[in-house]
Amino acid sequence: MVAIVLAVACTTKKTLPVKTTVGDAYQVMILCPNEVWQGELSLAVCDALERDAEGLTRPQGYFDIVAQKAPEVATDIDKKYGNILTISILPGGEECEVTVARNLYARPQTVVSLVAPSVEAATEFVNSEAATLCDYFEAAERARSINYSRVRQADQLVEDFANRVGYAMLIPAGFTKATTADPTLLWYLRDYPTKAQYIFAYDYEYTDELDLTAEWLMMSLDNKLSTISSRGAVGSYMGVNQSDPYYARTVTINGREWVELRGHWEVTNDFMGGPFVSYSTLNAEKNEITTIMFAIYAPEEPQRNLLREIEHMIYSIE
């Protein structure tokens, strides 16, 4: 048996490339010899990167594989994608090794390189470390979103959010503050002709550990959003769909623990709805739970990038 070891080294070019990256967010270019990219290895990589993203109302892969090219025929355009996965085989070794390079051919760029002693070892590695490979590219996408928003933030809303919620979080430019019937519910929105992005935030007193369970947090979201109605739709009210599958996990972001929920929101007596992700954390000093929710309305467009773009803002909280 070949030992499969995750040995990671990160490098960043001291001088940034002049060229900027091409393509859309969450696209990955594969650079791999044609004789290697076949059979089980190609299936393993596709399963790892293009698995369904959780929580969306329509199926969409976590990443989109643009193409696979042999390194010797890859063009300058191929090498300018923001996310690149390279796979190479060096017989005689005993371990799989992964290196991560930043801004190798363009900027901002992340190149993940997998070197394996055999195709079988590479396949086994991808199958066992699929989440790790995705995490490298997800971290890169997150950093791009935050850096972009940091220089194009809505300054007044950033200040308003910090004053109301108690946490400093980036609010991207283009958002406006909406009026809510519940003064304790903060709501920012960014409207487009055929889609919209929403940010909600509120807090409430912490009573016991059940307050941070997924079931309680879903009910809390449903109750809080019920004060919002659709314009022109009589008897309408917003809420989360608790009958649809939803996903919950605990994550640590910049040293703070959050409960992450992914699911679907909807408006009763109207046809509006879409995916959401919320983050809830305990502020021990105030004995309060703070919930921040990111949601989108995109009935005809791909949802993944629209939601990820704003949910990345939770990582701007220190």
Image (spheres, grey):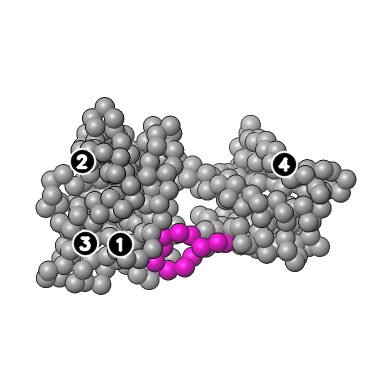
In the foreground, 286 or 159: 286
Residue 260 part of the magenta segment: no
Residue 43 locus on image (x, y percent)? 68, 64
Q: Secondary structure at mark 3?
A: strand
Q: Earlier in the sequence, mark 4 or mark 1?
A: 4
In this figure, which residue is indicated by the disc labeled 4?
5
Q: Which mark is residue 242?
A: 1
Q: Which mark is residue 147?
A: none
Q: Which mark lies nearer to you, 3 or 4?
A: 4
Q: Which mark is residue 204?
A: 2
Q: Earlier in the sequence, mark 1 or mark 2?
A: 2
In this figure, which residue is indicated by the disc labeled 3?
238
Q: Earlier in the sequence, mark 3 or mark 2?
A: 2
Quarter holding residue 208 = top left
Which amino acid, mark 4? Val
Q: CA distance from mark 4 to mark 2?
A: 45 Å
Identity of the residue drawn at 43% across and 32% down: 255
Q: CA distance from mark 3 to mark 2?
A: 19 Å
